[in-house]
Image: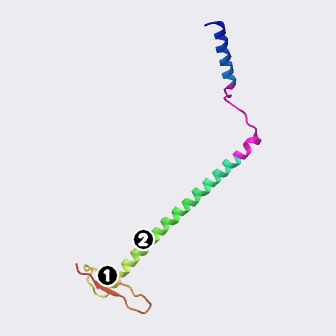
Amino acid sequence: MTEQTEEKVLSEEVQEEQATPADVVEVEWEQMEELIAIKQELARTENAMAAFLLDVEKKRASGLDRISALEEAALTTARSIQKAKGLDEETVYELRLPSAEGEKGYFIRKDP
């Protein structure tokens, strides 16, 4: 290499080093304060959302358990009424509930 070429290459390397940002750059608290507040609010909001969703899931599970229990109670009560009326438990019946208080309900046999 010629001396001029070496100087040009060295000059370009120096310029590149000057243009390259430092690996660690200090940032004053005042500049970071808003970002820290936002990150803290984000963490609080995420925690609140997690607690909310957990509560919703618990209530959903409880509601589904309640629905299952009520369906089972309705089926048990209907079978008890069917038995009290002397109807064969092996025969399939449709139970028509009364539409108003004081009206009668009916078991209607479903033929296979």
- Quarter holding the N terminus? top right
Q: Name the residue under label 2.
A: 68
Please name the residue shown 44% across and 72% down the image. 67
Q: Position of residue 85 (x, y in %)?
A: 31, 88
Classify 72 as above or below 95: above
Binning the other alpha carbons within 10 Å of mark 2 as few (below 14), some (14 to 19) or many (20 upward) gives: few
Q: Quadrant of residue 30?
A: top right
In the image shown, does 92 or 73 lie closer to the viewer? 92
In the image shown, does 58 or 9 lie closer to the viewer? 9
Q: Nearer the viewer, mark 2 or mark 1?
A: 1
Marked residue nearer the N-terminal end (2 or 1) = 2
Q: Position of residue 58 (x, y in %)?
A: 52, 63
- Amino acid of disc 2: Ser
In the image shown, does 110 or 84 lie closer to the viewer? 110
Q: How many labels does the image show?
A: 2
- Amino acid of disc 1: Glu
Residue stretch in magenta: 19-35
Classify 7 as above or below 40: above
Q: Extreme left residue here?
A: 112
Q: Quadrant of residue 92?
A: bottom left
Q: Mark 1 points at which residue?
A: 94
Q: Quadrant of residue 101?
A: bottom left
Q: Extreme top residue here?
A: 2
In the image shown, does 51 or 27 lie closer to the viewer? 27
- Quarter holding the C terminus? bottom left
